[in-house]
Image: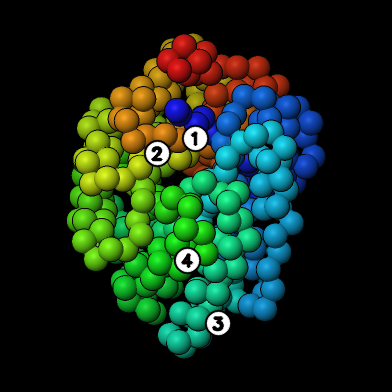
Amino acid sequence: GLVVGSAAAGGGHHEDQPYPDPISSDQAYRDVLGREFSSLSPENQMKWEYVRPTRETYDFAAADAIVDFAAQHGQVVRGHTLLWHSQNPEWLENGNFSAEELRAMLREHIHTVVGRYAGRVQQWDVANEIFDESGTLRTTENIWIRELGPGIIADAFRWAHEADPNAKLFFNDYGVESDNAKSDAYYALIQDLLAQGVPVHGFSAQAHLDLDDGFPADLAQNLRRFADLGLDTAITELDVRMTLPQGGAPTEQQLAEQADFYRRALQACLDVSSCHSFTVWGLPDKYSWVPGTFPDQGAATIYWDDFTPKPAHHALLNTL
Ligand code: XIL
């Protein structure tokens, strides 16, 4: 069956204002999250920046709150993320560690974090955004690949598998919805890793879509080629942003187009038998990362700020 999920928002920024985690502070948010979704993803709370305040310590409070909420509501969890170029703590990025130290740190981190949630996290985004748009590994931005070489990617999957042999281990990225240079790079890498027996189980498209860019019409077809490698596939961070008119409210036409994008994304997942997990990235718009990241854009989620459903919400329910 299909698991429909949401990111548990928090630790994000909107117009430069940091938010407290709404999962602990907003009862209306908790009600919708608990009632309407069967999977949760921590939007930030399992990232290095949050889990690793210092080299010696772990802080699992915010991540635990999400995993506990999910358990109380019979929901599964997507873990996010272990090896990434972004949202790493400064002590790590600026620490001038030796390759040997970094390797030991990543190994210990993965064993500790994945081990802590073993049996409670269904899917892990082990490696996030390792390729750029041209399909080149991010060898300068990504500290792990830069300092340890591309072989560290296979090791990360092996270590995660050691810590939780039942978790499905994913590559996750944006801009891989279509068959393009970036998704081709994943396809080649994953074929290679599978041939070496590396425990890779899934490929997921974040699907941060923009009305102005048009819908990635070959989404299902692209996911299917990864499915044909024997992998699970997923849509992990769906939102559909738009350039807002003066005044900030989306037009009826934008809302209708947005609903159509959501519907088509869900339909693509339903059309691919290995696509078991479909996640929207945050709710409602007031907690969305979009306005803080993309100037003049917003209204990307399926709920109004008072948690009433937008046309996109109806479109998803009608498609399920
Ligand atoms: C974003 C969060 O939504 C923001 O709150 C945070 O400030 C930055 O990160 N790809 C990913 C996610 O894999 O982790 C990102 O989440 C969005 C893009």
Whether ligand 1 has any atom under 8 Å from the Cβ at mark 2 is answered as no
**In terms of secondary structure, where does tag 1 sit?**
strand
Q: Nearer the viewer, residue 126 or 96?
A: 126
Real-space Cα separation, disc 1 to disc 3, in angstroms? 35 Å
Disc 3 marks a residue whose amino acid type is Gly
Q: Nearer the viewer, residue 290 or 46?
A: 46
Q: Residue at x 47, y 66 (%)?
A: 162
Task: Tell me: residue 98, above or below residue 124.
Answer: below
Q: Nearer the viewer, mark 2 or mark 3?
A: 2
Residue 244 visible: yes
Residue that carries the numbered disc 2 in the rendered image: 234
Left or right of 261 on screen, residue 89: right
Disc 4 marks a residue whose amino acid type is Glu
**In terms of secondary structure, where does tag 3 sit?**
loop
Q: Residue at x 60, y 17 (%)?
A: 309
Residue that carries the numbered disc 3 in the rendered image: 95
Q: Nearer the viewer, mark 1 or mark 4?
A: 4
Which numbered tag is attached to residue 279? Answer: 1
Task: Tell me: residue 16, above or below residue 148.
Answer: above
Contact flag, marks 1 and 3 (Cβ < 8 Å): no
Which numbered tag is attached to residue 162? Answer: 4
Pointer 1 or 3: first along the chain: 3
Contact flag, marks 1 and 4 (Cβ < 8 Å): no
Left or right of 232 on screen, residue 61: right
Disc 1 marks a residue whose amino acid type is Thr
Contact flag, marks 4 and 3 (Cβ < 8 Å): no
Pointer 2 or 1: first along the chain: 2
